[in-house]
Amino acid sequence: MNAPYRPTLTRAGRPATYSVEALNERGEALATPIAGEHPLTLYVDKREVVTLMTLGQAPECLAIGYLRNQRLVDSIDAIAAVQVDWETDSVAVTTRKGVKGLGAKMKKRTVTTGCGQGTVFGDLMEEIDAVRLRDDVRLTEETLYSLLDAVRRHETIYKAAGAVHGCALATNAPGASEILSFVEDVGRHNAVDAIAGQMWLEGIDGSDKIFYTTGRLTSEMVIKATQMRIPFLVSRSGLTKMGHEIATRVGITMIGRAVNRHYLLFTGKHRFVKTTMPTALA
């Protein structure tokens, strides 16, 4: 089996946390970890596209995933190189044949509710109707609980420093789930974009996977999961009206308020299989 195509990449990840001094309630000085935050301006073929605020852990994947989810490039094969330069706080993406209609795509955009600035370019929301998610896959309640336990046990930047959102791509096996990728960033839209970039780079098919996020399920999160062809979207947080409307329209299985053994199944109920008996009320 041939390895998936990879463009020329820098490896310019930055530390996730930094130590600063803080005084506690007793006036004691403590070395305290805080989350990193860096501006990263994305250029495509020397044209400025957007400035992202990011931890900077996986800037190359973030750039690729951003272009993927904004539908500015159609495939990883279209990208020749991704080069990050922290001296200028920039990432330069060079494409093989240029991006057709880039100017027109950038003129029409919807500003979304992501932490920082999230945008959906062009007619992206209209294009979502053409996506067909698999209906022959199922998520069991036991597998959901396995995922939530794996997330709980996962070592995270949030546990050390707070101030970040996390997203995970996970497997969906009968009664078990394994985290394939866990990315944290100052905005949940950055974390999902970085995972999207990793999926392209590694040739991962999302059509039977589970996507987990610590953040709320907004329209942007539903759209991005749908673009990655992922049928299961899980969050420990709640959701928005527009997120619910789009999830219903595309038929994604969306679960919110998922913590420990509690959850709320909102949409795509046909893919979810309840496998444990409800707790009897006293």
Image (spheres, helix red, strand yellow):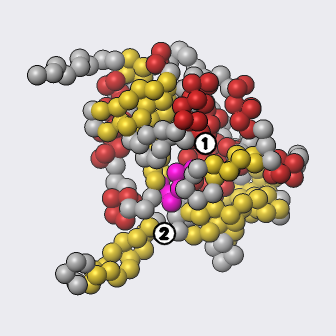
Q: Is residue 132 left or right of residue 213?
A: right
> What percent of the width, then of the height, locates residue 131?
68, 26
Is 54 covered by the magenta stretch?
Answer: no
- Check the picture and name the quadrant holding the C terminus: top left
Q: Is residue 13 left or right of residue 20?
A: right
> What percent of the width, then of the height, locates residue 101?
88, 46
Give yes or no for contact between labels 2 and 1 (Cβ–Cβ under 8 Å).
no
For label 2, the residue is: 36
Q: Residue at x 69, y 75 (%)?
A: 88
For label 1, the residue is: 220
> What percent of the width, then of the height, locates residue 70?
71, 45
Nearer to the camera, 10 or 152: 152
Q: Which kind of residue does numbered mark 2 sit on?
A: Gly
Q: Please identify the residue farthest to the front as the structure is shown.
A: 241
Nearer to the camera, 86 or 233: 233
Q: Which residues are magenta?
A: 184-189
17 versus 69 height, above or below: below
Q: Nearer the viewer, mark 2 or mark 1?
A: 1
Is 185 covered by the magenta stretch?
Answer: yes
Q: Residue at x 37, y 65 (%)?
A: 161
> What percent of the width, then of the height, locates residue 16?
46, 66
